[in-house]
Amino acid sequence: MTRDGRTDPSVLERSPERIEPHRPAVHRPACPRPAGERVGGEALRLESVILEAVTGALDRLEATARPDLVADFVAPLHAAITAILAQRPGADADRHPAVDVAAESLARALYGLLTGASAAWDEAVEPDWPARRLDRLLALHLPPPWIGAIDVPVGGGAAGDGGLAGPLFRTAIPALARRFPRLSLHKDLARFRVAPPVPAPVALPCELHGSSRRATQRLVEVKDLDTARSIVNDDADFSPPAMEAYLRMLAAGSGRDLAPSIRIARNAMFFMSGERHALARRAVAACLGTNRLAVWTDLVDERIEAALDRLSRSGTPDLVRDFAEPLFRQVTQPILGISTRDPARFDAVAPVLQDVLEPWLPMRELMRLQDVSVELLALMQLPAAPRQGPGASLLSSLLASELPDFEAEDLKALVLVLYGASFNLSHTLGNALHWILGRPPDERDEVARPTWIEGNMERLIALCASPKYIYRMARRPSQRGDLTVSIGDTARFQLLSINRGATSGHLAFGHGLHHCVGAGLTRLLLRRAVPALLRRFPTITLVPQAQAYHTMSQTVAMASLPCRLTVTPIPEAP
């Protein structure tokens, strides 16, 4: 479901289902073993059990329409291994705690691998991966009672002689990485059981292949970078969705007054094209271009410190509620020129604007968005003396520029839509903080260095940017690799798969003529806010798996990110 109750068309919720033991397939994945390791008879028998279980679980995962790594891989592994071990003489048919611990630890390891850099997943197929990475992975993801042994014994056996977690990780992870090299996780749909000693994933919905395909008669899903680039670079064959024309046709056919929605669509830069778009883009870039934002750095730093003060005063600190969200409002509103008659009402209603990013809304949702837009536009105040130049807000500068074919109400609408799209700045900051603070301690130390954020900015954005989709509409038929596109088709770019492993070539901010005009502001805020947070709270930690996400169809957006602060006292000046 979306934040406001609509169904997310890309990922539907799974209903609980009973998991049955499966038959082993004929072809079995290899189980690479560190060179020189001696293997006892019990260990060989255990590995045979695991091989059998992994093969069946891979087949089940491949055959599932809406795959989930817990329901369709880890749970079948658990069931199959338990069923086989229960047949041993003297075994308890109902209780195998070692299997429970090993399976939950595997699910945690998969979550960790798939929320990190893609290189960690890519290298799992290498023959020496167990020797290089297995001990660290076990130490990170086994619960505390087992960490000292580095393994989970079965039937009283010691680690390496009848242990379960090591062979399970060594077999299951490389086999999964070989079968699904472009496996990606829907992070916002992951669910955890938060219980001692450590939380365990209960749902890990995923994309298996990242292959572009036709989803419906009029919708093609683009999931690979090559196809995506061929489309976004082709302004002759593809354009943004023609929302203004669509809404005019809808108004004529329905008899509804959609004039306010038509004004919003006409002035939403991600739906605009042609000379009018070029004029607006040049005018906006004159204020929000990377080289023009330096004038706002002092304001940004001042607002970051205020947000950090607010975070430090919170009895239950939350990096979304107490830091990212207020910082977003306090930075973007003055830069864009948002001044309102009732700030509290404006801030309460404005999040609904995020729905304008989704084309082809149902009529009921379209009318709701229209009502909200009308209210917000009425709350906005025009500057008394519009001006251009350093320190002028975007709205002030646009009004002073006297753009042809843009009335004052058009410019208010343009700025309002940009503000709605700018919520992605807050969400991206929240996602980035979740990723950074979720890294193992040794990686956290590296991130805390002042130079890290600059050197890793594009990788961080590719991993953490909040938009789920970009949309383009086909002006004429074409062939894009194996994908046949018809005239009038909507191409929906799934950024989760497209940006997997990307750095400077990612599409998180779009590309070309429709590259996001707020990209520079997002980078500026990340560049200033992340190091400032880590300087103020160098030992900050997240409450384990206590994060929550908004259920939004177009955006990966955290609703809460509880944390624990340790304030380093500032020495008094002599």
Image: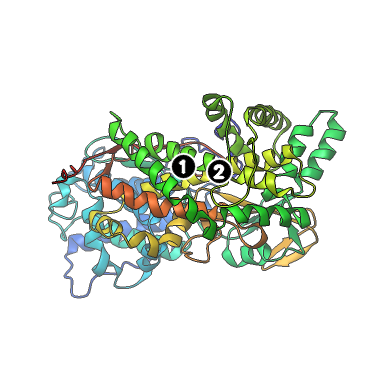
Local packing at callout 1 (Cα closer than 10 Å; few below 14, some 14-19, many 20+) is some
Lateral position of residue 36 relative to residue 534, left or right: left
Earlier in the chain: of badge 1 and badge 2, it is 2
Above or below, 109 relative to 198? below
Closer to us: 544 or 245? 245
Q: Is residue 268 visible?
A: no
Disc 1: which residue:
189
- Amino acid type of disc 2? Val
Q: Determine the residue positioned at 30% across, 30% down.
A: 314
Residue 407, x across and y down, in percent:
76, 41
Q: Is 88 situated left or right of 420 in this image?
A: left
The amino acid at mark 1 is Leu
Q: In which quarter of the image is residue 232?
A: bottom right
Can residue 37 be seen from the camera position used here? yes
Tag of residue 11: 2
In which quadrant of the rendered view does residue 86 lie? top left
Image: 551 above or below 117: above
Query: Quick check: 15 left or right of 127?
Result: right
Identify the element where label 2 is drawn. Answer: loop
Q: How far apart are marks 1 and 2 (CA)?
A: 9 Å
Q: What is the total number of numbered labels drawn onto the structure image?
A: 2
Q: In x, y percent, where is residue 179?
A: 45, 63
Q: Residues within 10 Å of mark 2 (few under 14, many from 20)?
A: some
Q: Where does the image place residue 543, in percent across and percent down from the top left? A: 29, 38
Front residue of 116/388: it is 388
Q: Nearer the viewer, residue 171 or 361?
A: 361
Return the x and y of residue 409 as percentages of the image width and height. 73, 37
Give the residue displayed 40% in from the left and 34% down from the top: 321
Instruction: Verify CB contact (< 8 Å) between mark 1 and mark 2.
Output: yes
Q: Residue furthest bottom?
A: 36
